[in-house]
């Protein structure tokens, strides 16, 4: 109802959009459908599995796994916002109403911005754990962790409202065909027949705050972590510290790298095909890889998973 009320105030001539999808090559439609269906199922199973393992095992109720729990939750949510519609576009004409399009844009922006903040909180957590181990329990108290996550979702809410509110003011009269697999900001701006200057400015500001500030925070955190690691004399201590941080560095590189390349590039200089590829990385590749990145090299998760499976088998 909210989106209908907002849409009624918009004089857009378009009531429905057509999503062209990832590609228009007929011979690629079926193989890509099964490929991305497998990725989606793996994403859902992997992230739900991680949520269950962390939730059911008290030894994992620590700040590190609290943030990982929220990371899996945001991955699961925004993959679910994007991929079902993407899969439809591989097998038939994919129509999406104006209201549904704006809703998809809102929830996508909300979860992506939230993920940026969760990854930043995880970097800060690793900094405190390695550089200030004696004060870790004091600094990363349950109250602090809760405040960080409340701030994370507040940032997501504000950013998503800014993006969606600015998009709702646009008039779409240059056709209703979106050359993309989702209702994102760049493809919608291409269809607008009114000035998009405010939208581009807001997008640059919001994305700058959501990507540049977290990226700098992560960079500073890991610079201090590396400096501290090189002062650790025992080789085993260094390898353990590197092991703790390496998973997060990989996840951050995939997510921030692709999103920064896409959104911090001037709008006129962008290619929609490039945008599709970049979007695939941070909306599809990152959510499916994160459960494996954080679990395959994590002994605590292995132990908790085996205990959970044994409880289920022998219960």
Image (cartoon, rainbow, N blue to C red):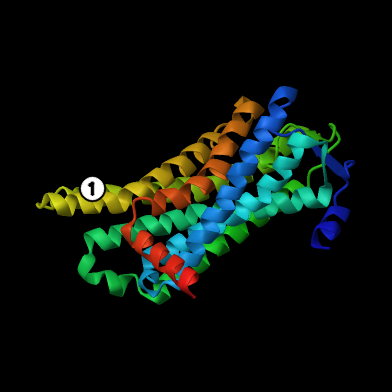
> From the viewer's perspective, is residue 71 above or below residue 105?
below
Residue located farthest toward the front when viewing the structure as drawn: 314
- Residue 202 shows in the view: yes
Question: Quick one: 290 or 217, which is closer to the camera?
Answer: 290
Against 271, is 287 above or below?
below
Question: Dot 1: what SS?
Answer: helix
**Above or below, comparing residue 248 to residue 307 in the picture:** above
Q: Is residue 95 left or right of residue 42?
A: right
Q: Which residue is mark 1?
A: 226
Rendered location of residue 17, percent (x, y): 83, 40
As rendered, which of 64 and 49 lies closer to the eye? 49
Residue depicted at x 56% and y 55%: 45
Image position, residue 211 (x, y; %): 49, 46
Q: Is residue 314 left or right of residue 26?
A: left
User: Which part of the image, by quadrant, shows the N terminus?
Assistant: bottom right
Taking the spot 46% from the left edge, 52% from the top edge, the residue there is 291
Image location of residue 134, percent across then percent down: 20, 70
Q: Is residue 47 left or right of residue 107?
A: left
């Amino acid at each position: 109802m909210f989106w209908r009320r907002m849409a009624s105030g918009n004089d857009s001539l378009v009531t429905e959009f057509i999503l062209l999808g990832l590609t228009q090559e007929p011979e690629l439609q079926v193989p890509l459908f099964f490929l991305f269906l497998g990725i989606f199922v793996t994403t859902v199973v992997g992230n739900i599995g991680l949520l269950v393992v962390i939730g059911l095992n008290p030894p994992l109720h620590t700040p590190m796994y609290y943030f990982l729990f929220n990371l899996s939750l945001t991955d699961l949510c925004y993959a679910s916002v994007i991929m079902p519609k993407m899969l439809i576009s591989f097998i038939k004409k994919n129509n999406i109403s104006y209201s549904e399009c704006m809703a998809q844009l809102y929830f996508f922006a909300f979860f992506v911005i939230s993920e940026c903040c969760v990854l930043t909180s995880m970097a800060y957590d690793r900094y405190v754990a390695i550089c200030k181990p004696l004060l870790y329990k004091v600094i990363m108290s349950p109250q602090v962790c809760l405040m960080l996550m409340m701030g994370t979702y507040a940032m997501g809410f504000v950013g998503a409202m800014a993006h969606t509110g600015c998009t709702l003011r646009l008039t779409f009269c240059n056709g209703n065909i979106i050359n993309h697999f989702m209702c994102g900001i760049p493809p919608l701006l291409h269809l607008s027949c009114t000035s998009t200057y405010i939208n581009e400015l807001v997008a640059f500001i919001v994305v700058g705050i959501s990507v540049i500030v977290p990226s700098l925070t992560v960079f500073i955190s890991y610079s201090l972590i590396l400096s501290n690691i090189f002062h650790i004399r025992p080789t085993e201590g260094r390898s353990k510290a590197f092991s703790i941080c390496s998973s997060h560095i990989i996840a951050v590189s995939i997510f921030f790298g692709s999103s920064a390349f896409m959104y911090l590039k001037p709008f006129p200089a962008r290619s929609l095909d490039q945008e599709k590829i970049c979007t695939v990385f941070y909306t599809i590749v990152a959510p499916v890889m994160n459960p494996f990145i954080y679990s395959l090299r994590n002994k605590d998760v292995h132990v908790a998973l085996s205990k959970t499976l044994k409880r289920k088998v022998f219960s």
